[in-house]
Image (spheres, grey):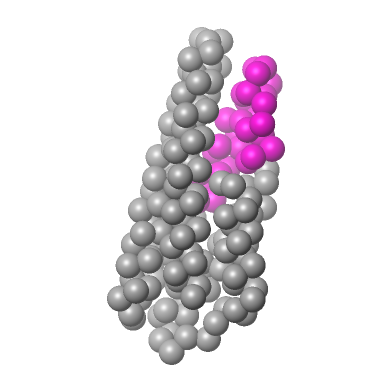
């Protein structure tokens, strides 16, 4: 995920201070989004650092491990958000959009892992190409996550 998207979400969360909501369930959704976005920023830094170079087998193994950690982190966010129930329609729609975007992001991670595994097994460049295409899809998903987070946070 681009750092700018999540940093923007975090900045909005800090500025609004978690924005007190009229509905308790909407407030709990906001809290889940804020806490997981803050945690995800650290994971994203590690992930992006590992994805910079995919040239050697060592780099590919690091990327594979980072992708696994990233998938676990996003799944944790998705599970926590899915358990919450919104009180208002706009928050519910934004929650659904975020869940769809998180699922798309996980799909991109799975494709990335598949490409990395292919590159490791065959030593071929086609796996690296597939991995880089998956990263593009993940960027799109991260933009959607950021947009949904802006709606939820306020």
* Residue depicted at x 63% and y 23%: 54
Task: In the displayed orientation, state which residue is furthest to the bottom.
Answer: 22
Residue 114's place in the image compared with 10, above or below, is above
**17 is higher (above) or lower (below) than 80:** below
Residue 151 occupies quadrant:
bottom left
Residue 140 visible within the image:
yes
Q: Residue 43 location, x and y as percent?
A: 63, 49
The residue depicted at 39 percent of the width and 48 percent of the height is: 103
Of 13 and 32, nearer the camera is 13
Q: Residue at x 40, y 52 (%)?
A: 101
The part of the chain drawn in magenta is 47-75
Magenta-span inclusion, residue 51 = yes
- Residue 10 figure quarter: bottom right
Reply yes or no: does residue 137 show up in magenta.
no
Percent of width and height locating residue 51: 63, 33
Q: Position of residue 19 (x, y in %)?
A: 55, 82
Horizontal and vertical percent position of residue 52: 66, 31
Horizontal side, residue 150 vs residue 41: left or right: left
Horizontal relation, residue 45 to residue 150: left or right? right
Q: Is residue 57 above or below residue 12?
A: above
- The overriding secondary structure of the stretch rendered in magenta is helix
**Is 30 placed above or below 52 here?**
below
How many discs appear? 0
Q: Residue at x 49, y 50 (%)?
A: 142
Q: Quadrant of residue 37?
A: bottom right
Is residue 39 among what the camera can see?
A: no
């Amino acid at each position: 995920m681009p750092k700018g998207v999540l940093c923007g979400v975090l900045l909005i969360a800090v500025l609004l201070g978690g924005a007190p909501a009229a509905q308790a369930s909407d407030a709990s959704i906001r809290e889940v989004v804020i806490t997981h976005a803050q945690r995800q920023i650290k994971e994203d830094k590690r992930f992006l650092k590992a994805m910079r170079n995919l040239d050697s087998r060592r780099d590919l193994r690091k990327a594979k491990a980072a992708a696994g950690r990233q998938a676990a982190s996003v799944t944790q966010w998705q599970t926590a958000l899915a358990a919450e129930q919104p009180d208002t329609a706009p928050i519910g729609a934004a929650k659904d959009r975020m869940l769809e975007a998180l699922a798309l992001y996980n799909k991109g991670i799975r494709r990335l892992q598949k490409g990395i595994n292919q590159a490791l097994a065959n030593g071929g460049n086609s796996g690296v190409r597939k991995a880089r295409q998956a990263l593009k899809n993940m960027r799109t998903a991260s933009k959607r996550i950021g947009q949904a987070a802006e709606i939820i946070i306020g």
